[in-house]
Image (tube, grey):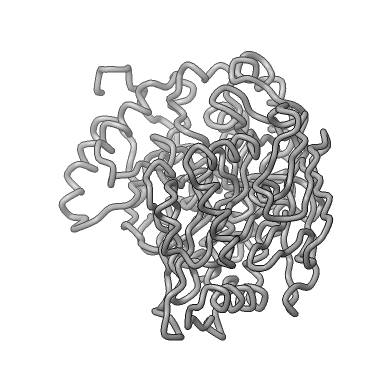
Amino acid sequence: MSKGGGLLVAGTTSDAGKSVVTAGICRWLVRQGVRVAPFKGQNMSLNSFVTREGAEIGRAQAMQAQAARVEPTALMNPVLLKPGSDRSSQVVLMGKPVGELSARGYHGGRQQALFGTVVECLEELRSTYDAVICEGAGSPAEINLRRNDIVNMGIARAARFPVVVVGDIDRGGVFAQFFGTTALLAPEDQELIAGYLVNKFRGDVTLLEPGLDMLLGLTGRRTFGVLPYAHGLGIDEEDGLRVSLRGAVRESVVAPPVGEDVLRVAVCAVPLMSNFTDVDALAAEPGVVVRFVDRPEELVDADLVVVPGTRGTVRALAWLRERGLADAIVRRAAEGRPVLGVCGGFQALGERIEDEVESRAGEVPGLGLLPVRVRFAPEKTLARPAGEALGERVEGYEIHHGVADVRGGEPFLDGCRVGAVWGTHWHGSLESDGFRRAFLAEVARAAGRRFVPAPDTSFGALREEQLDTLGDLIEEHADTDALWKLIEQGPPTGLPFIAPGAPS
């Protein structure tokens, strides 16, 4: 395969499966000896990652880079939007924050101004790799946003990449979504829509085939595969956790407990929760059950309460107090029952917060469980720290404006510990196997549980297995010869134009 080929994976909706399909194609290609890179021109997510050069990118693109067995870089996600409210987001350009913009301000002009940077990043990847697999955002048929689009058909047209549209059949209506998505596009964009990929199918695929034949007749475009519903993948998502579904569980993919007891973890589903993937390593442990909660009574039987990261620490504090969770967490700490705060959650556990940057609320009292005072700085800390804690080597990454002044307690990573309350800014620390086991053993002792961490769980190996499963889904259930041809040769010629509302 010569350098510079590629395709764009679009979706009929958000959460149709673009991220995992992109990762699966990357893993399939790299297993064929192809040097491949992922790319997403513009990402909106509170789940982010820090590259080795200190750039912040979407965590999904970091996962896709792992699928491609390459080091993630800012080139793979040049524009990242981090929502701070329903109407505004922090704009991260080439891994660094450049300001806060309203949705109107961004889509009204700034977005198009970034198009040149996005295209330059894609072209640099194309000059380096044999293939680039791009992920779209939302749906390419969001016609109100098409004029300034830099992530869907805008980038496909600039690169002359073929587009495969993914639809989630588990939600229903996938044939209408495929047809409607194509029909709403301009002729120049329709020329690039090569066909479709059905995701999350359950049952006998032969029952679906008549519909696929009819879709071909209506659109002139084929379906490149039907991917079955795959349970327990646990792959990093954009903002795929629907925390409005109270009690949502991050399912364990492994066995029952090694010891006599399970360990129950309750994660407070704070507003603007960021990097909820931090608890995935806990959910991968045999006998650990992780739930997302929003009521104080749901903390009663929890052995560990996690206050996770958030893009709005002051807002999260107010939410914890309004819900009665703050009082429940303080009572737990007084009883010596384990609590862990990560990033914004760590800041909330401290004595006070001075915030003239994120919320501009000034001085706000924290929960007072850790001897820490936090001041928000205009500059964002982006780092990949490593060290030792609980006698084990540990690595993580930092993404925060808050600067912590730790005034006591026992040292714990960059933060501190008081009794059974721990706090740190480090995301991803629980992915370090030895440290995670030592931490869970401490939690079990403090909680009075006869829980024993499994001695051989490797989170990295489990993640590799999950990525291989995605590659297997593509290899076994997609027409890989046809996908290869698209990547190498570009969009098919002679595809018909579909007028909206008038099947051809």
Q: Residue at x 47, y 83 (%)?
A: 450
Q: Position of residue 207 (x, y in %)?
A: 15, 51
Is 353 left, or right, of 271 in this rendering?
right
Name the quarter where the C terminus is drawn: top left
Is residue 421 or residue 53 the one in the foreground?
421
Name the quarter where the N terminus is drawn: bottom right
User: How many marks can you see?
Assistant: 0
Q: Position of residue 332 (x, y in %)?
A: 54, 60
Residue 500 visible from this viewpoint: yes
Q: Position of residue 39 (x, y in %)?
A: 62, 44
Q: Position of residue 356 (x, y in %)?
A: 77, 29
Please say if 343 is above or below 83.
below
Is residue 133 or residue 231 the one in the foreground?
231
Q: Residue at x 76, y 62 (%)?
A: 416
Is residue 264 or residue 233 the one in the foreground?
264
Q: Residue at x 24, y 43 (%)?
A: 212
Please say if 204 is above or below 61.
below
The quadrant where residue 204 appears? bottom left
Is 468 left, or right, of 118 in this rendering?
left
Residue 474 visible from this viewpoint: no
Q: Residue at x 63, y 36 (%)?
A: 312
